[in-house]
Image: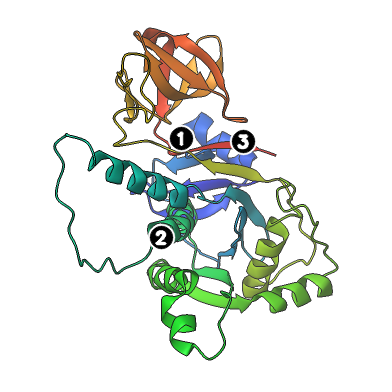
Amino acid sequence: MFVPVVDSNQNPLMPTTPSRARKWIKSGKATPFWKKGVFCVRLNQEPSARNMQDIAVGVDPGSKREGFTVKSKAHIYLNIQTQAVDWVKKAVATRRVLRRNRRQRKTPYRKNRKNRSRGGIPPSTKARWNWKLRILSWLKKIFPITIIVVEDIKARTKKNQKKWNKSFSPLEVGKKWFYQEVRKLGKLIKVKGWQTAEKRNEFGLKKISNKLSSSFYAHCVDSFVLALGAVGGKRKPENTQVLRVIPLRFHRRQLHVQTPTKGGKRKRYGGTISLRFKRGSLVKHAKLGLTYVGGFSGGKISLHSLKTGKRITQSAKPQEIKFLTYSSWRFSAV
């Protein structure tokens, strides 16, 4: 394992070993901090040298799980498996039904705007690709990444419909937007899926069939092969530890529950602030340790497990909680 290093201006430098990071912290040369689940150090003085090596991040997209590997020629710095953002399509459909139902009731509402061309990228497609972009932007802040290698997935095509295949397929439209944004972060390399499989077999690596597994050999083995093809190095991964990153779902503008209780009243629902704490924030409880903030009720806050996401308690007092950092996802090491 290696520790990411940034200078006093938050510019990423080459990672260092944990032993050296401890010496820097003990002598006051560096300050420790956490960046969305990854332990980092910030130098308090000018580094002795700024020699850089090429660092690549391999991206293995998927419909349910996705893999990311940060690697140089000599070392694997980080393996990440994420859960795809797959709830937006149903949420948009539910919003549409509720909006249409409100128009049948005697309640204030805006008039329907007819003949509007929505255009752009479908919300569910953009949410999926934007999640990958968020992960890459986070990694770019703690590692001096120069190369981004993405497995170029293809949408299902239709015969004799070239316009659909290139312009109307949501996957192709979202992928095109994603590639444009990735080029702003570094050099983009696209690799076909069959090329990844050939390289994986050439290196003697096997990918397990269980796509929902948290093992390195479920998705990160492909992201490792992608990064290896860009910067080179050993064909056998020396670091197979995986950091699981799962996005949190926030109901920002859903002010009431969909189904009213007895008496026709609807309870408060939604929002992102729980008694001065932003939901999803990493906090330390006096007894429960590291947790993240959920909802609140009656002056008490709900705290959830980082590993499972399940609610641990809903009666935590604000004075018992120490805020650590903001976060919009939960994480755990595998």
* Residue 279 percent coordinates (x, y): 39, 29
Residue name at image x 62 percent, y 43 percent? 244
User: In the image, which disc is placed on residue 332?
Assistant: 3
Mark 2 or 3, which is nearer the eye?
2
Q: Quadrant of the N terminus?
A: top right
Q: CA distance from mark 3 to mark 1?
A: 17 Å
| First of labels 2, 3 by sequence position | 2
Query: 231 left or right of 302?
Result: right
Which marked residue is nearer to the observer: mark 1 or mark 2?
A: 2
For the residue marked with disc 2, what is the amino acid? Lys
* Disc 3 element: strand
Around disc 1, counting alpha carbons within 10 Å, would you say few (fewer than 14), some (14 to 19), or many (20 or more)?
A: some
Location of the C terminus (image quadrant): top right
Can residue 30 be seen in the rendering of this structure? Answer: yes
Name the secondary structure under disc 1: strand
Identify which amino acid the numbered label 3 is placed on: Ser
